[in-house]
Amino acid sequence: MKKPVKVAVTGAAGQIGYALLFRIAAGDMLGPDQPVDLHLLEITPALGALEGVTMELNDCAFPLLNKIVQTDDPNVAFKDCDYALLVGAMPRKQGMERKDLLSANGGIFGPQGKAINDHASRDVKVLVVGNPANTNALIAQQNAPDLDPKCFTAMVRLDHNRAMSQLAEKTGAHNTDIKNVIIWGNHSATQYPDIHHATVKGKDAKPQVDEAWYTDTFIPDVQQRGAAIIKARGASSAASAASAAIDHMRSWALGTPEGEWVSMGIPSDGSYGIEPGVIYGYPCTCKDGKYEIVQGLEINEFSRGKMDATDAELREERAAVEHLFA
Ligand code: NAD
Ligand code: LMR
């Protein structure tokens, strides 16, 4: 058995937290041979509920769960942590766009970025789930000047999984037959779900679906799936969001299969003509705990326009929060 690693989760008593913690403790994120210490952060009024979640975690008697720390102090939560899942933030309600949450949630991520900077492992892998996830990740990163900016990522994996599932349904295939969809850009309604490089059962996906379905059904449905769930469920997605967070961290930590990529919101290095610095969804391969952008994909005019539109939104969001940077 390996030495335990420390996994910090914020918003641990919330609805995503309730779907996430049990799967981390069961080994779904880091593998069946990796014990974990869970560092659970909540705001003070939610510590009672957090105690209840902790009681349930203990009652599962998970073989891989080594220790639980409950706290309302980010400096304690992020102490020596190897992984940090920043979930704690307000979810949107019906009729809101995710960026409407910037003023409510942006303020959370500066202090947490600073606490990560001051206390986490120098190799920490941070995933921001709380919305608007890309720009919150940028705020956290900008408050952590001593860490490699690449430590900070945002979740577009839920959109990636949604795209796979919708393409599978349309083509009568199974999710496991779908490879290499891409979510470019922001986890918002401007995201660009791209199937130009995807395959279904090893064959190019694009010729297997008609253009009108791609442009008028698939793209808007993936872009608007979060809103559709809020409308149907009366609350934002939780179990699927937790599952995507597990997938994102597992790919990053344990690697992606040969010839396959996943979508991750990561600091742009200017690849594909995107504004450097913004946290942008890119196709990535992962190996030895590091991610790399898949280079050299051909981008047609249609894709270029959509990739630039979501880049423009991220630049606008960045301009709106620059006062929160250290
Ligand atoms: P929730 O309201 O059920 O839970 C949020 C929890 O965070 C609450 O328990 C709250 O007390 C806690 N919290 C608030 N401020 C905190 C702080 N400063 N430190 C620590 N904890 C804090 O919400 P939820 O449904 O679990 O959603 C959480 C966030 O995830 C929302 O912003 C939601 O929009 C977002 N989300 C993102 C994706 C994605 O794909 N990126 C998907 C689904 C949801
Ligand atoms: C989602 O995509 O389901 C989440 O980001 C929640 C939301 O606000 O849509």
Image (cartoon, rainbow, N blue to C red):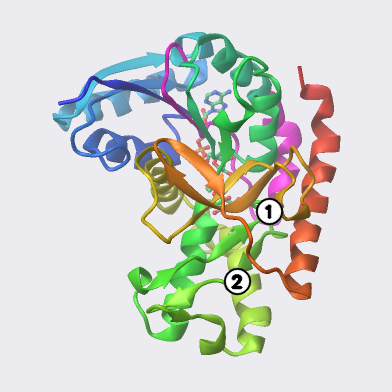
Position in image of residue 94 (x %, y %)? 65, 55
| Three-letter code for the amino acid on which mark 1 is drawn | Gly
Q: Which of the labelled discs sits on residue 221, or is there none?
A: 2
| Three-letter code for the amino acid on which mark 2 is drawn | Asp
Q: What stretch is highlighted in magenta?
A: 78-107
Position in image of residue 24 (x %, y %)? 31, 36
Number of the front mark, 2 or 1: 1
Few, some or many residues within 10 Å of mark 1 (<14, 14–19, 20+): many
Q: Is residue 278 above or below residue 312?
A: above
Mark 1 CB near ligand 1 (8 Å cut): no
Q: Which of the labelled discs sits on residue 223, or is there none?
A: none
Q: Could you tell me how far apart the alpha carbons at marks 2 and 1 are, in whole angstroms? A: 16 Å
Which of the two residues, 239 or 168, is positioned nearer the viewer here?
168
Residue 170 is left or right of residue 275, and the answer is left
Q: Which of the labelled discs sits on residue 185, or is there none?
A: 1
Q: Is residue 193 above or below residue 96?
A: below
- Is 91 magenta? The answer is yes
Q: Is residue 165 above or below residue 85?
A: below
Can you say which quadrant of the picture contains the N terminus? top left
Can you say which quadrant of the picture contains the C terminus? top right
Which of the two residues, 41 or 274, is positioned nearer the viewer here?
274
Whether residue 231 is visible here, answered yes or no, is: no
Q: Which residue is drawn at 50% across and 17% down?
A: 122
Q: Which residue is drawn at 51% across and 80% down?
A: 205
Element under label 1? Answer: loop
Position in image of residue 71 (x %, y %)? 43, 13
Who comes first in sequence, dot 2 or dot 1? 1
Position in image of residue 258 (x %, y %)? 38, 57
Whether residue 279 is visible here, answered yes or no, is: yes
